Image (cartoon, rainbow, N blue to C red):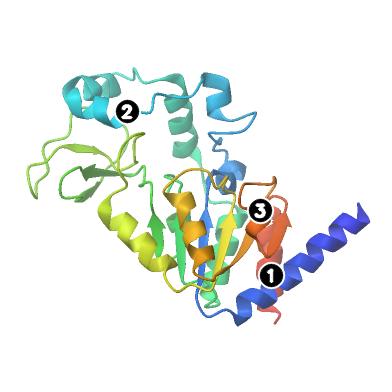
Amino acid sequence: MTNKLDKIKSNIVKSAELISKSKKVVLMTGAGISVDSGIPTFQGTEGLWARFGKPKMNAFSEFIKNKDSWWDREINHQRSPYVMELRRAIEKAKPNDAHYAICDIQKLGKINHIITQNIDGLHIESGSKNVIEIHGNRNYLRCVDCENRYRFSSPIFEKPLPCSNCGGVIKYDSVMFGEPIPKLMLKNSKNAIKECDLLIIVGSSSTVRPAAGLSWIAKSDGAKLIEVNINDTKLSSECEIILRGSSTDILPKLYKEISSL
């Protein structure tokens, strides 16, 4: 145990030094960072899919074909059990120590952009800036045509009106299975990754594309990688430094180490 703790401490010191000397740092987060905020992951033995089964991958096309019936089921709380559990968890969730540590590191001028695969909005709530929510934000609605976004308060009691900007179809901002990533979010993500010399990946399985592909793009362009995760991932072998452990434990220590340099 002592050797393991010493290795973690040593890797935190190495990470802080690498972050401090890097010119453009991007941090990417996945579901793992929000576990300690009470939000379950999708994958893994305790994930939503393990307990409820993997959902259909054509949710977006089904929505487009049957928009009215989709919103009727939504308004009458007739969604699948995994959706309802995730929604209740997100509504109660608050930023945890990992979210705040990222915000603190960013305030030191050490993180240029944050790309998150999460729809919970916790990075923004914690105070972080330059946050790109590649899979959307559960607190917004979005037009599928012009990508105009609308803040809303849950629950919704009636079907949203057509987009006030273009008359297009309105859906939740969160990206459905089978739905293309909104063009602006994908463009912003690629621009953030471009020319970064360090990418920090926190709590991500690194399997969900196109978000996972951004890590490989950064690596192929010469960026160094730091991974913070409780488990090995497909990306682990490509990382210069691995910080094995909970993000709520690792990231506050990393902030403390960076601030001491």
Q: Residue furthest front?
A: 220
Instruction: Return the residue nearer the eye: 249 or 46.
Output: 46
- Structural distance between the alpha carbons of marks 3 and 2: 31 Å
Q: Is residue 240 visible?
A: yes
- Residue at point 52% right, 53% down? 29
- Residues packed near mark 3 inside 10 Å, few (<14), some (14 to 19) or many (20 plus): some
Please name the residue shown 68% across and 67% down the image: 254
The answer to which image quadrant residue 158 occupies is top left
Q: Secondary structure at mark 2?
A: helix
**Image disc number at residue 236:** 3
> As displayed, is residue 104 above or below residue 163?
below
Q: Which residue is mark 2?
A: 59
**Residue wearing tag 1:** 15
Q: Is residue 126 visible?
A: no
The reply to whether the C-beta atoms of the residues labelled 3 and 1 are less than 8 Å apart is no
Q: CA distance from mark 2 to mark 1?
A: 40 Å
* Residue type marked 2: Ala
**Residue 100 in the image: x percent, y percent?**
56, 60
